[in-house]
Amino acid sequence: MFRNQYDTDVTTWSPAGRLFQVEYAMEAVKQGAAAVGLRSTSHVVLATVNKAASDLSSHQRKVFKIDDHIGVAIAGLTADGRVLSRYLRNECINHSFVYESPLPVSRLVVRLADKAQVCTQRSWKRPYGVGLLVAGLDETGAHLYYNCPSGNYFEYQAFAIGSRSQAAKTYMERRFEAFNNYSRDELIKDAIFAIRETLQGEKLTSSICTVAIVGIGEPFHMIDQKIIQEVIDSVEIKEDAAAAADQAPAQDDDKSSEAAPMDI
């Protein structure tokens, strides 16, 4: 039933210094639908896969607006993500009420990490089985953070979590050095490209992905599905044209390489 005698309680250490219950929560994030985030100097884009579990059901929301300057994308247990999103909204509302200013992104991320960490040292609690990509904009610029179920948090230029996220990471690692100078539209296009990498051959449409953005002069909001589909279609048209152009010279080379019949 259990992996070993050290994984029955979140507060029980293994002789190797591991907390297996925390590792199981991190594994739940890896099993969730993919989510990616990209950051430039002025904008942050989040994109998620939101396929429905059945043809008869709707999909679960994976992107949540926290405040005008902050939003999150989740991978893992959706119910846990919904609870943590409500907690983040309350923190932003309380800070705005008391200080009459937006809550800095880094401070919100630390509070979320502290909340997750408490669940790793209380025997009557379990770790949250969800990872969150936190996108935000404050006085110090645009930020993208990843909050782990273990209570750790990291700031990234670009990152991906969830199922088959390694393919998206590989794609972004080849291009991240240029992200700082990207325009809004270029960032959205690369986010869609990265999400497509996680589908591994499955056709990407606007119906199975959600894209959201926050930036200078642009509050956090979901991008309209029609715009997403237009971006996908334009990318596919360019790829088809490039493929056709590559095939044409190859066919010409084949024809030229045919030797003329020799008269004997």
Image (tube, rainbow, N blue to C red):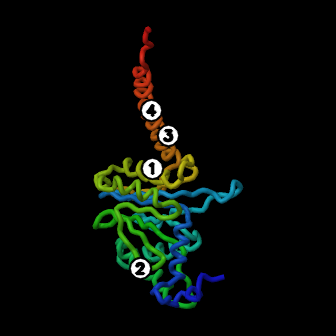
> What is the x, y in percent for residue 98?
38, 79
Q: Mark 3 sits on what residue?
A: 233
Q: CA distance from mark 2 to mark 1?
A: 32 Å
Query: In the image, what residue occupies the spot 42% across and 18% down?
Result: 259
127 vs 42, left or right, is right
Q: Earlier in the sequence, mark 2 or mark 1?
A: 2
Residue 123, located in which quarter of the rendered image?
A: bottom right
Query: In the image, what residue occupies the spot 49% across and 41% down?
Result: 230
Q: Earlier in the sequence, mark 4 or mark 2?
A: 2
Label 1 near label 3: C-beta < 8 Å?
no
Q: Mark 4 sits on what residue?
A: 241
Q: Residue furthest front?
A: 264
Query: In the image, what residue occupies the spot 44% across and 25% down?
Result: 251
Q: CA distance from mark 3 to mark 4?
A: 12 Å
Q: Is residue 257 above or below residue 86?
A: above
Q: Viewer-nearest of labels 3 and 4? A: 4
Q: CA distance from mark 3 to mark 1?
A: 12 Å
Q: Viewer-nearest of labels 2 and 3? A: 3
Residue 217, located in which quarter of the rendered image?
A: bottom left
Q: Earlier in the sequence, mark 3 or mark 4?
A: 3
Q: Mark 2 sits on what residue?
A: 111
Q: CA distance from mark 2 to mark 3?
A: 41 Å
Q: CA distance from mark 4 to mark 2?
A: 49 Å
Q: Mark 1 sits on what residue?
A: 193
Q: Amino acid at mark 1?
A: Phe
Q: Nearer the viewer, residue 123 or 249?
A: 249
Helix, strand or loop at label 1? It is helix
